């Protein structure tokens, strides 16, 4: 694997038609757990910076593209995103094992690191589209929801050695709904409303 912009962008694009191939390539890299956690932290910081830049450039976004008040506080945004992502890492690992999967925590980390990286690319594209074609940005945001579930489902299927992506998707949906409900309650208590979607794709 080469850490070059063109190569990485090609892998991001390949993640849509061939997610399991990309998953196998990434799982075979043998990165240390410490390196994966550090990479995840860096990607979360970069993603937050891009989102805050979007809010700064477009304080009054077009109707349907509002991102919510949470993004006005970069530190809180980073904290909530980090907690959510870490919860998904462990949920992906333990839920898969509970259903007989064979995946490792490192593979769960790789899955989420890659998903966050894909979302960083999407957020950068969203920023560029917001400058020239806001409505196209909205379509990209909707497409990002599909891409997130698509990649997460097939990476989890490959990671745990499952045979049915449909069943994996069902478990992911139930798990995420439960997790987002819990975060909704926390955000409501903190006074930020009850819509975790204000965080963006990831």
Image (tube, rainbow, N blue to C red):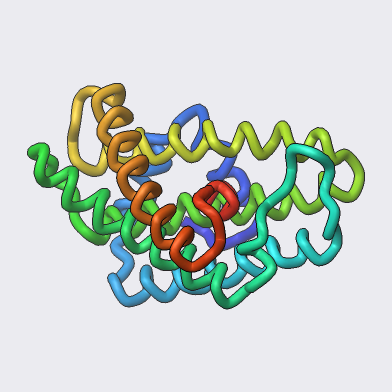
Q: Quadrant of residue 77?
A: bottom right
Q: Quadrant of residue 107?
A: bottom left
* Residue 14 left/right relative to 101: right
The spot of residue 18 in percent (x, y) is: 45, 31
Q: Is residue 14 left or right of residue 52?
A: left
Please indicate whether residue 49 sits to the left or right of residue 201 in the image: right
Q: Compared with residue 46, is residue 19 higher up or lower down, i.e. above or below? A: above
Q: Residue 96 appears at what percent x and percent y?
A: 18, 43
Q: Nearer the viewer, residue 156 or 200?
A: 200
x, y percent for residue 120: 61, 56
x 76%, y 40%: residue: 137
Q: Residue at x 74, y 38 (%)?
A: 64
| Image: 195 above or below 162 | below
Q: Is residue 49 left or right of residue 192?
A: right
Residue drawn at (47%, 61%), measured in percent from left and top? 187
x and y percent of residue 1 in the render? 46, 56
Q: Which residue is at the front of the view, 6 or 188?
A: 188
Which residue is at 68% across, 52% downward? 67
Q: How many marks?
A: 0
Q: Nearer the viewer, residue 47 or 180?
A: 180
Identify the image quadrant of residue 165: top left
Q: Is residue 126 above or below residue 109?
A: above
Q: Nearer the viewer, residue 24 or 125?
A: 125
């Amino acid at each position: 694997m080469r850490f070059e912009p063109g190569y990485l962008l090609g892998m991001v694009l390949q993640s849509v038609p061939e997610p399991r191939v990309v998953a196998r390539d990434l799982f075979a890299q043998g990165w240390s757990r410490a390196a994966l956690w550090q990479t995840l932290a860096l990607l979360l910081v970069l993603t937050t910076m891009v989102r805050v830049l979007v809010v700064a450039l477009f304080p009054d976004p077009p109707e349907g593209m509002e991102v919510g008040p949470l993004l006005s506080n970069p530190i809180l945004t980073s904290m909530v995103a980090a907690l959510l992502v870490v919860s998904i890492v462990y949920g992906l690992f333990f839920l898969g094992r509970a259903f007989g999967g064979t995946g490792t925590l490192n593979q769960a980390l790789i899955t989420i690191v890659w998903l966050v990286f894909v979302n960083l690319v999407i957020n950068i594209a969203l920023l560029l589209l917001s400058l020239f074609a806001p409505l196209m940005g909205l379509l990209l945001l909707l497409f990002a929801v599909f891409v997130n579930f698509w990649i997460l489902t097939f990476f989890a299927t490959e990671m745990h050695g499952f045979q049915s992506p449909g069943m994996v998707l069902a478990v992911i949906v139930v798990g995420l709904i439960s997790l987002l409900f819990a975060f909704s309650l926390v955000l409501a208590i903190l006074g930020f409303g009850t819509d975790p979607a204000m965080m963006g794709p990831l």
